[in-house]
Image (cartoon, rainbow, N blue to C red):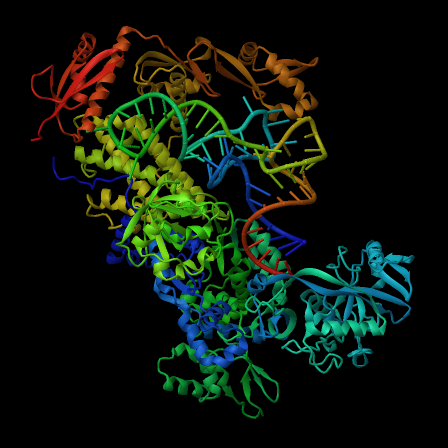
Amino acid sequence: MSQPKFEQAQAIVDFAAREREIAAFWKSRGIFEKSLDIRKGQPQFTFYEGPPTANGLPHNGHVLTRVFKDVFLRYQTMCGRYVPRKAGWDTHGLPVEVEVEKELGIHGKEAIEEYGVEPFIVRCIESVFRYTEEWERMTEKIGFWADLEDAYVTYHRSYVESVWWALSELVKKDLLYRGHKIVWWWPQGGTALSAGEVGQGYKEVEDPSVYVRFPLVEDPNVSLLVWTTTPWTLPSNQYAAVRPDFDYVQVKDEDGSLIIAAALRETIEQKIGRDLPVEKAFKGSELLGKTYLPPFDYFYEQYRDLEVTTAAGVKEKALWKVLAADFVELDSGTGLVHEAPAFGEVDFDLHRNTVASYAQGGESVPLLCPVKPDGKFTDAAPDVAGEFVKDADKLLIRLLKDKGILLHREQYKHEYPFCWRADEDPLIQYARPAWFIKTTARNKEVLQNNDAIRWLPEHIGQGRFGDFLRNNVDWALSRERYWGTPLNIWINDETGKMQSPSSADEILAKNPNAFDYWHKAKAANPALSDHLMVHKPWIDAVTWQEPGESGVYRRVPEVIDCWFDSGCMPFAQWGFPHQGAEKFNESFPADYITEAIDQTRGWFYSQVMIATLLFDKECQQRLGLDPLRDYPLPFKTCIVLGHVNDPSGKKESKSKGNYTPPDAILDRVAQDFAVVTAEDCAVIVEPGQALIARDDLEALDLQPGQTMKAYCPDRGDCFVELVMQPGKGMPRRVVVLSDEDRKTLGAKINAKGKSVTPIEVPWLPDAQRVTIESPVSTAPGADAFRWFFLASSAPWNTRRHSLANVRAIQKDFPLKLRNVYSFFTIYANIDGFDPAQHKGQPVADRALLDRWILSELALTTRTVRTQMDDFHAFEAATALNNFADALSRWYVRRSRARYWKSGFDADKQNAYATLYECLTTVAKLAAPFTPFMADEIYRNIVCRVDAEAPESVHLADMPAVDESLIDLLLSEEMAVIRNVVSLGLRVRTEHKIKVRQPLASAEAVISDAGLRNRVAVHARLVEEELNVHKVSFVPPEQAHVHYVLKPNFRQLGPRLGKLVKAAKQAFAAADAAILRAELLAKGATSITIEGTVVPLGPEDVEILVEATDHFAAAGDSSAVVVLNTDLTPELLDEGLFREILRRVQDMRKDHDVAYTERIRLHLDGSERLQRVAAANRESLMAETLCSELLGPTDEAVDWKEFVLDGEDLRLALVRIKND
RNA sequence: GGGCGUGUAGCUCAGUUGGUUAGAGCGCAUCCCUGAUAAGGAUGAGGCCGGUGGUUCAAAUCCACCCACGCCCA
């Protein structure tokens, strides 16, 4: 045999190791760069990379987005588009600051200032790329091709200046204003907390709650009764709120009348222990506009006469009046709500909307706030000045009592947020000055823009995202933090005038010395990154003066919300408009982006909003965009991905440890555990055992009792093999070992014992951790991981991730295709198949099976291409999976004999050419999905034999659809044939007749005459598969079947109505044969149901054949298969021969005889067996590659004895040296 | 608490405009096949289609309410 053409492929390999080799090949040959180079000048497919933050480790969600990004980029590249892939990093924001605070062991703004803002920022910039290496490793392993070298970085000077430009544009358009924002405020720390931090800090506490009277101005004998759990906000009261459509009552009480919600009267009566008889009843709407005396009079004198003009042109008081609000509820309180807009977000919104609705005077309405940022009252509230708000509750309640307006007080148990770091410190909602973008002014435009975006899934567009846009409020842009894009607003400290420069150059034009402070700092410390020039605190020293204007322009202290950074990405990644105009013009908008659903209000929103605000027609013209965009969309198509959950559907959480790290899929099946004692976990451990939580066992896809390697992470060479067992009640990520094993490994008990949390385990000293690693099973690898995300479910569904689930889905397409590929390499090498030489006959002349699979291939190609063009990766993956199934389970299965036979005739060449065409086409179609395996196949079976071929599948073109190969009738026929085979095998199983035993005949009953005639040509396939000499396709009249009626209720239902139930019985009782005959003869018939004659057409019933009992038959709705089970002596002999044959083949395998190696065989046994063997001598020798078939011998050979059907058989096999 | 989404077999998913006996693959069990062999085939077990109520001759499918999970916002 000549040198094998193809590398012999294995179906199962160490995937992670194989993928590393392929990744190394891509790198060394610059395949990614070449894939870009060869498409230069072609139409561009634009993609935007949603920047991840690199200051945390990459997790499964990041793998998911990278997979969905990569699959379409690779696909479009192979379709001939030029697809640049600029990577990017999101580097600003609170998470970075928090990380640095943790490292420094400090918390709060005061502590940062104390530490020094300059060194703090330097630490931030160092922290940003802490995990870059891990990110790059994951990116490479998963096969995400991106230009990491030329990545954009949000803290870079060019990026910051683009953001500045964007903001300066908004200032020009008068879309920036100063207002207040309610934040969760940590008074002791002097800082606002993010929603995530607030969520972590909720505790159940008891607070005083008070029922307070607000006497009406028009009649102080009547009071509004309000309820609050924060008495300290009462001095800041501005309004009372009611629901206009609720029922309210005026009730009589000892010290005058009260107004309360009707529904809450009884509850209040019970609380105060006396009856409250109703005097009047009315709707809440009647209370609107009524004024009252505030509970504390600190601001009363100042604002009692303040008036505003409403939209209706009516003059009314501005403060201490009743407003309408739909958030008023009846489950607690009084139905009237105390409103202190400075200390509650809903209160503030009500206040802001009310003020905005006034025709006149709105701007003079104050926000009452007698509390300083440190949480202490100001002198404006003299009774409690200097008191911390929560501590003032008591005193304020006593004052209310003294004033005689406290009706009732009680303790109230509820959830209240505390600082997550200092858990004794309560948070308060607090109004802070803030800068806003007037996004509401462009509501119409942003909605129009959104309508032009293609969202997947579709409902996001009008649902979650559309709703958010419709209910949009102005964007609170500023953050009182340090590490972010500095807000480029400078204000004249005398005139109050505002300027918003769009670049450092613009500032330098105003003051050439503006950055002197920075340059000095840089000179003193040359290691400072040049990008810090445009960052706090250096930028805070930048000032200038305007000629002819007194005063100095100084920057406001805030930084910009980092979502604004991210939304500027479409132009800021190029430094546009200061540079990169051409790049921006050719890459705006993006054709495609994808991120997970949490970005709806994040990056998706920021991009859409900023593009809408900036790039109106005037701006586009001024910037020279060509052509002008009708809609300034940032992206045309957006796939919104679901999240990755644990196997039980719970969110993956670092602190719970309920996640499978990406490396367990991509690299090796291993997990680190903290070492604890058996006593600590109340379990018993034997030497040689390791106990871990059952969930951890499952996470590693282990059965109890499996053996694993255990070692301390720093001493991989010193390991023991341990039997894994679940430890009852053990927490996750801890392991119990016997004293002996622990000693052998040198492992120490971790200090925290079993209370160590999963998040701490990786940070324990090496000796306190034990790595549990599988000595045999390997990680499923990147292709499997990719396939898991792409093929398991629609992209927007949440998916349950685990090692077991990835392995399960790997058995689909990836392993099926590898099986066929492996089969091909075995036989192609044996026969010396050369695709250049053995091209096969024209497809029309090939076997039906070849024509069928090529038709399926063309159909699959068409589906994959149309679905991928449409961004439907899941549907495309399903099509690939179905094709691999057809190829493996039918085409190859039924074609095997064609490859086995000796010689190399036309049919064999056809078979090879067909299979080769299938494999090479699928390699290309699958390349975007499973890039490693696809390239392995392609390089092995194409590149090795075709010097002209591109060196990687990723440089090849997507296959085109050859419509001429599509034969839908053939597809239908083959489906029927496969069904007939399946039914025939079922009959054999039911009657316990082995497939090895040949049968004389079988009948396949098919009602439809046309189909029956068409499938008859495929009889040979059925005969081979069922091991039956003669299969005939017959009409029902000629077979032992009976008819069954299946009424078509979809047709009949609307006509019959209530008769449907009776109809069911009537159809069951009817003679199907007669109805069928009439339908065939006349095209119509009828049936009588409860005395009503119902006419029936062919549409109304389906008539099926069903196997008659007592015959060896099976059937379903399309066919019935009847087997002739008579066994003649000849058939039995044939069966016996197959038994002999199989024993010989078994022995070949036992003796490790190579596929093509020849043997000598000695056969001895009963007279009958010898006769059977002699009768089939030729085929026995041919099929077992037997050169000499001999009888008993005196030589010392290795006899093996069998009993077949009661007959004795002795066989001896001798290998013959190949020449 | 509000909005959006998801919920079908142990796992991963199909299930047309409502149509009466809810499917597939994987896994499991039993059997079969035997040079793709860590592959392949057949059969079987396994489902209150998340729950309750309603509309209808007919509900996994339509409606209402509730539950669980996730996301976003409170």
Q: Is residue A1068 visible?
A: yes
Occupied quadrant, residue A937: top left
Picture quarter with the C terminus of chain A = top left
Is residue A632 in sight in this rendering?
no
Q: Residue at x 66, y 20 (%)?
A: A1061
The image quarter containing residue A508 is: bottom left
Residue A603, percent across and down? 51, 61
- Where is A805 relative to A674, above or below? above
The extreme right residue here reads: A279
Q: Quadrant of the N terminus of chain A?
A: top left
Residue A189 is left or right of residue A8, and the answer is: right
Spot occupied by residue B56 in the image (x, y as percentages of width and height):
70, 29
Check the image and report above or below for A552 versus A1074.
below
Q: Is residue A181 left or right of residue B71?
A: right
* In the depicted structure, whether residue A538 falls above or below residue A1138: below
Percent across and percent down for residue A905 are: 19, 27
Q: Residue at x 39, y 61 (%)?
A: A764
Q: Which of the pair A780/A80 is nearer the observer?
A: A780
Name of the residue lying farthest toward the top: A1129
Which residue: 70% across, 12% down?
A1091
How far across and down, in percent of the image, does residue A910 sit?
24, 30
Relative horizontal placement of residue A1218, taking residue A274 as reference (left or right)? left
Q: In this orientation, which residue lies closer to the viewer: A444 or A609? A: A609
